Structures are given as C-alpha cells and as structure tokens.
Amino acid sequence: AAMVEIQKEYVEAAILIGRKPGVIIFRHILPNVVSPILVIATISLALAIILEATLSFLGVGAPPTEPSLGTLIRIGQSFFFSGEWWILFFPAVTLLMLALSVNLLGDWLRDALNPKLDD
C-alpha cells in the first residue's frame, strides 16, 4: 500500500516543493496507508481465531489441558446426540460471534478511516 501511495502525484508534488521525507511520510503517506493495514489486521485476527479453533478441534492445536473453543466444541460433539446439545452449541456460537465481531470491527474501521468513502 505504501509503494502505491509513493507513486501518486501529490507525493511527487511534495517532493518537488522540497518537503522533508519525514513530513511526506507522516502527513501524506501514513494517513492513506493506515486504513488498509488495520482492515487486513482485523481480517487476519479473525482468521487466526478460526484457525486456532480448527486445529484444537482436530487435536493438533493447543494441548488438551488448555482451554480453547475448538477443544470445547470437540468435547461437546460427543454429547450432542445424547440430548445435551448445549455443550456443543454455546462454544460454537461463541466462536461464530467472535469471528463475526472481529470482521465487523474491521468493516467499521474501513468505513470510518477511509477518506475516499465519504457518502
């Protein structure tokens, strides 16, 4: 994202009028690069949460002695058909809501920080 911003005309104009590199970076480039970085970070966080839960569910993630949503879902799976559905339901809903919340946070950050999306 920074390499794209460096090639824009306003950055070249700032260089031509003699602005210092620090001023160009902090006043022109950084405000336009922060939004995509934050959005990518929140999407990566949601992906990491789901990946950790998946690996724990499969038994190759965190040790069984440490709490994990994937481990709780794996344990609840064996109780599901015996009528104790809530042991599986609540960790699964928690994982779903956590991933959805992080993705919605990233979407809100994109809308709030992107100066090009003024409606």
Image: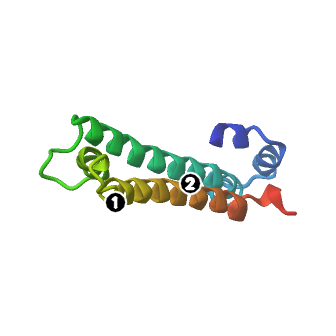
Which circle, 2 or 1, is nearer the viewer? 1
Q: Is residue 70 left or right of residue 99?
A: left
Which residue matches tag 1?
A: 86
Residue 23: % across, % down = 66, 59
Residue 81: % across, % down = 31, 46
Q: Secondary structure at mark 2?
A: helix
Looking at the rendered image, the quarter that the C terminus falls into is: bottom right
Q: What type is the residue that disc 2 sits on?
A: Asn
Which residue matches tag 2?
A: 103
Q: What type is the residue that disc 1 sits on?
A: Trp
Q: Is residue 58 above or below residue 73?
A: above
Badge 2 or badge 1: first in the primary sequence = 1
Residue 47 vs residue 84, the one in the foreground: 84
Residue 17: % across, % down = 81, 52
Residue 117 vs residue 28, the one in the foreground: 117
**What is the distance, in whole Å, between disc 2 and disc 1 at their CAs?**
25 Å
Looking at the rendered image, the quarter that the N terminus falls into is: top right
Q: Is residue 17 left or right of residue 21?
A: right
Q: Is residue 103 left or right of residue 111?
A: left
Residue 70 vs residue 51, the one in the foreground: 70
How crowded pointer 2 is (Cα within 10 Å; few <14, some 14-19, many 20+) is rated as many
